[in-house]
Amino acid sequence: MSTLVTIAILNYQRRDALRRALEAARAQRYARLEVLAIDNASSDGSQEMVRDEFPDVHLVALPENIAAAARNEGVRAAKGEIVFTLDNDVLLSTPDDVARGVAAFERHPRAAVVNFTILGPDGILSRRDWCHPRDPDRWAGAEFLTDYVLEGASACRREAFLAAGGYWRPFFIGHEGWDLALRLLDAGHELVYSPDVQVRHMVDPTVRPSSRIYYTFTRNAIWVALRSYRARAAAASIARDMLLMAYTAARAGELRAWARGVVDAVRGSRRALRTRRPMSVETSRQLARIRALKPSIAARALRHARERLI
């Protein structure tokens, strides 16, 4: 008998995007499939649309917007052994994507997560969504072990996700996939990138202020380091990421958002330290092996500069 799979789609204030995502989920040919819509207390009629147009979809209606942590509620509610966690603007691109994702787990029995290839609306690889420690121009078409969880474009083994604690709620949004990845690796799991499942990110900038990324990514990078890295590695990670975020924020005219992120990270550091669980020495070594082919900071900065010109 085939593995039961759940597709859990996260939504907030994007009724039409959610409709398209649910239609793509419905089109899957995989036999044993459950579809969930997890709604972060939307007020735009999203919940009513699901009830009226998709009676076969299980709606998980949350009383407040808890952002990324709502994915935890979707995984908890799921009946499937494997859960596809998708954002509402991420569309499965073929009717066989679920079957291909299940096959990737079968090839990698130690994998807790399989990350998908993210394409842009034009069907071309979305480099802005590439978070893996390899050059996308060389490695996007290959399957390999990675150090990241693409929160809205991946599938997880339900039991491993829940045992690791899921996404830490104080992050709200940003870096929660990095944090979860470190926890899963330290628990002995693998994380896989596979080109066999390709999803389209129909980028929608609404309800996201431009300063958000510079604030939350700065704040959350510090909290990730405090929660999971060993002392020396945490100091190095914080120093490196603060310099990179300051550089990118300055280029975007968002230094005030970066500064607020630093201040609020310090204010919230006690909460992060209370949940601190430094990774083992072996996990640190495993991370170093996974990241052996990671492009240099200079190469990544040059790539980002080129992308800004396109």
Image (cartoon, helix red, strand yellow):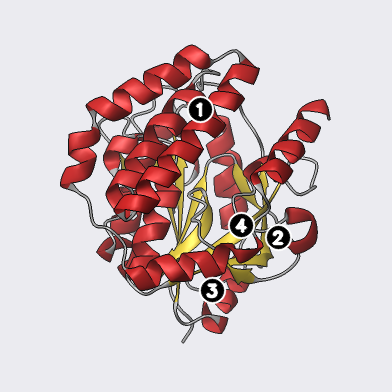
- Depth order, front residue of 129/183: 183
Q: Which residue is mark 3?
A: 31
Q: Nearer the viewer, residue 230 or 78?
A: 230
Q: Which residue is labeled 4 in the image?
A: 133
- Residue 307 percent location from the top left of the image: 77, 34
**Between disc 3 and disc 1, whose residue precedes?**
3
Element at label 2? loop
Which three-letter amino acid code belongs to the residue tagged 4? Pro
Q: Residues within 10 Å of mark 2 (few under 14, many from 20)?
A: some
User: Real-space Cα distance between discs 2 and 3?
Assistant: 15 Å
Position of residue 20 relative to residue 177, above or below, is: above
Q: Work out whether residue 59 or residue 181 is closer to the camera in this orientation and state it.
A: 181
Percent of width and height locating residue 120? 73, 42
Distance of label 1 from label 4 (alpha carbons): 20 Å
Q: Going 46% across and 17% down the picture, which residue do you hit?
A: 257
Query: Does residue 81 appear anywhere in the picture?
Result: no
The secondary structure type at the circle numbered 4 is loop
In space, the residues marked 3 and 1 are separated at their CA atoms by: 39 Å
- Looking at the rendered structure, which numbered label has been put on residue 94? 2
- Which-is-in-front pick, marks 3 and 4? 4
What residue does disc 1 label? 213
Disc 1 vs disc 4: Cβ atoms closer than 8 Å? no
| Left or right of residue 286: residue 29 | right
Q: Nearer the viewer, mark 2 or mark 1?
A: 1
Q: Earlier in the sequence, mark 2 or mark 1?
A: 2
Disc number lying in front (4 or 2): 4
Report the amino acid beneath label 1.
Ile
